[in-house]
Image (cartoon, rainbow, N blue to C red):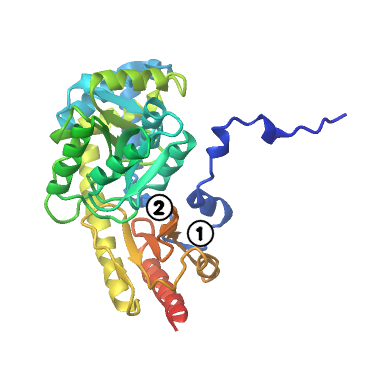
């Protein structure tokens, strides 16, 4: 006979901190062939160069044989580490490959955070990072602008143990904004003064459409920065590959941790990515991707100007995938979501990117995934909903 098991009683204390992503729930529950989706950070399928990927796979098998289907080094395949080194000018010994940039975030949390430790994040910030830090029972402290010193001092006064600062300096998710050189220097100064690490999450850095490039924080302070990169936005998200630049002692601990997670990154994916990096095909396609996304960003900005009512404002990103809207305080974008979805449009409320649940009058819109006709229709529908709320 079946035994009634109270599964919840068996879950760990950490398990109680695992909260499903509201963004992933959107994708699970709806048919997005029928919805105008501004919700996810999906790259455009037009950027997926399948012919190049197939050619790179054939080249890899010819060069290395079936061994590329074996287990590999936890640190990542040397061929890919060397290719990344050549591209970014970072020594191979300071590079490790991860199974996605999200894994890099999670590994950082695992090696640094004890329950109750304080981590400091820009406010608002990436939902996936908030989820990861919460799963290790960190005290997540959201910081506006560059107020990290005051926040760290306050945390220490309250008996908390600060561990690291997490920022997305280039085209932040969700706002699309970029940290100035002065702001980067200030944050690095705080980290060095407080003997903390900086987690520099940088999956969008190469998607710059306008403005002046700003040095990475890792290039400015390799002693106290872990730089996370991703192939998801420059190649394809189905290649679950990312990388970490950092001090060797920290990377050694990260690799030891990763061995208990998945042993090694996917080998075939690594050899394909290495080939595309080395022969220039990834770079060539990236130029096309930047042009495509520049056009979509410019178009969405024009549609916002055309349709949005007074009282709605938005960021004007110089790159990345997102525009962030601020609405009148009376509009609750969490409560409005079902009405928007019924009207045929999906977005993500800004509240989910705030550590304290604030920002309910904000929302994130993605412009990379939809074509221009659907971008215009989606913006028009949202504007109509906002007008109804304002009236």
Residue at 47 percent of width and 68 percent of height:
332
- x and y percent of residue 47 in the render? 32, 48
Q: Is residue 339 above or below residue 126?
A: below
367 or 247: which is nearer to us? 247
Count of labels in the image: 2
Q: Residues within 10 Å of mark 1 (few under 14, many from 20)?
A: few
User: Earlier along the polypeptide chain: callout 1 or callout 2?
Assistant: 1
Visible residue check, residue 236: yes
C-alpha distance separating marks 1 and 2: 26 Å
Q: Which residue is mark 1?
A: 33
Visible residue check, residue 285: no
Q: Are marks 1 and 2 in contact (CB under 8 Å)?
A: no
Toward the bottom, the furthest residue is 391
- x and y percent of residue 290 in the render? 23, 52
- x and y percent of residue 180 in the render? 15, 50
Q: Which residue is mark 2?
A: 353
191 or 333: which is nearer to us? 191
Q: Quadrant of residue 5?
A: top right
């Amino acid at each position: 006979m079946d035994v009634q098991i109270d599964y919840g009683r068996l879950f760990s204390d950490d398990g109680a901190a695992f909260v499903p992503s509201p963004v992933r729930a959107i994708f699970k529950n709806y048919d997005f062939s029928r919805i105008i989706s501004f919700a996810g950070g999906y790259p455009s399928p037009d950027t997926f160069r399948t012919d190049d990927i197939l050619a790179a796979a054939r080249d890899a098998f010819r060069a290395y044989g079936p061994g590329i289907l074996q287990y590999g080094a936890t640190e990542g395949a040397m061929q890919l580490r060397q290719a990344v080194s050549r591209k970014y000018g970072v020594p191979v010994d300071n590079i490790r490959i991860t199974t996605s940039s999200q894994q890099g975030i999670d590994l950082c949390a695992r090696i640094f955070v004890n329950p109750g430790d304080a981590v400091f994040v820009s406010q608002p910030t990436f939902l996936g990072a908030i989820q990861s830090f919460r799963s290790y029972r960190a005290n997540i402290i959201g910081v506006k602008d560059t107020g990290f010193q005051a926040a760290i001092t306050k945390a220490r006064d309250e008996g908390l143990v600060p561990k690291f600062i997490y920022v997305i300096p280039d085209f932040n998710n969700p706002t699309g904004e970029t940290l100035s050189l002065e702001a980067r220097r200030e944050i690095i100064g705080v980290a060095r003064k407080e003997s903390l690490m900086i987690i520099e999450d940088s999956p969008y850095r190469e998607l710059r459409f306008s403005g002046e490039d700003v040095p990475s924080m890792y290039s400015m302070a390799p002693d106290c920065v872990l730089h996370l990169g991703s192939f998801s936005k420059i190649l394809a998200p189905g290649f679950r590959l990312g990388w970490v630049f950092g001090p060797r002692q920290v990377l050694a601990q990260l690799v030891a941790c990763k061995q208990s997670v998945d042993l090694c990154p996917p080998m075939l994916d690594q050899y394909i990515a290495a080939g595309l990096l080395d022969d220039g095909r990834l770079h060539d396609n990236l130029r096309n991707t930047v042009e495509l996304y520049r056009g979509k960003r410019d178009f969405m900005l024009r549609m916002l100007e055309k349709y949005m009512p007074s009282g709605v404002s938005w960021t004007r990103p110089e790159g990345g995938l997102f525009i962030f809207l601020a609405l009148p305080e009376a509009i609750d974008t969490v409560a409005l979501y079902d009405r928007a979805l019924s009207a045929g449009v999906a977005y993500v409320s800004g509240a989910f990117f705030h550590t304290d649940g604030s920002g309910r009058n904000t929302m994130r819109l993605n412009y990379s995934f939809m074509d221009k006709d659907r971008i215009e229709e989606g913006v028009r529908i949202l504007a109509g909903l906002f007008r109804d709320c304002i009236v």
